Amino acid sequence: MHQPLRSLGDLRTVLPALLLLCLGVACTGQGAPQIVVKGATVQVSDAIKGSASSFMFVINDGRGEDNLLACVIKEYPLVYVELHDIVGGKMTMVKEIPIPARETTALKRGGLHIMFTGFPEETEKKVTLILTFEKSGPIEVSATVLS
């Protein structure tokens, strides 16, 4: 059975342990993610007709991690979409893109990105991407189309 604190000396012994415990809980990634997306673009491929890639910064200011699971182009819902990474110098499809807590994940050329197949030749200058996250759900993002 635990003994009650009897003096200020007991408190001085217990307080550092409590502080370390609280810090440990705060650093475990427990909590909700807070996702913000900036700088989203869709780059139309010159090399492969009907394909494009999307790049952006996914910022998670929350204490919880999240995963990007899917993407749809609102204006072109029939475009086929895959999440990709470059592994061993080769483009590889992935099921999800991890979005760690309190970090920025860059989707960029030569790394993690979103790949579109069946992308129309004539498009608007801006499109709306609907990004679906495991915990945060769908988030709409405006993306500039670059030819």
Image (tube, rainbow, N blue to C red):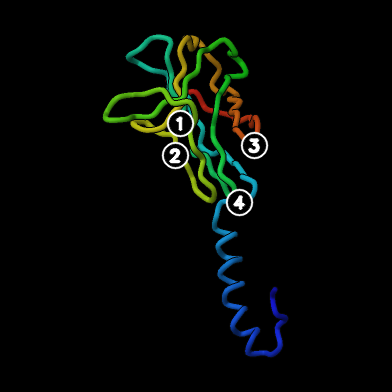
Q: Which mark is residue 106?
A: 2
At label 4, the amino acid type is Gln
- For the N terminus, the quadrant is bottom right
Give whichever of discs 4 and 2 has the lower sequence position. 4
Measured in 3D between alpha carbons, the distance from the residue under mark 4 to the one under mark 1, in whole angstroms, is: 28 Å
* Depth order, front residue of 44/58: 58
* Depth order, front residue of 65/2: 2
Can you tell which of label 3 and label 1 is closer to the viewer? 3
Residue 41 can be seen in this image: yes
**Residue 54, x across and y down, in percent:** 46, 26
At label 3, the amino acid type is Ser
Find disc 1 in the rendering and name its residue: 55
**Residue 27, x across and y down, in percent:** 54, 58
* Depth order, front residue of 74/13: 13
At label 1, the amino acid type is Phe
Give whichever of discs 4 and 1 has the lower sequence position. 4
Find disc 4 in the rendering and name its residue: 30
- For the C terminus, the quadrant is top left
| Vertical comparison of 120 with 56: above or below | above
Measured in 3D between alpha carbons, the distance from the residue under mark 3 to the one under mark 1, in whole angstroms, is: 19 Å
**Residue 87, x across and y down, in percent:** 32, 30
Q: How many marks?
A: 4
Asked whether disc 4 touches disc 3, contact meaning CB atoms under 8 Å apart, the reply is no
Asked whether disc 1 touches disc 2, contact meaning CB atoms under 8 Å apart, the reply is yes
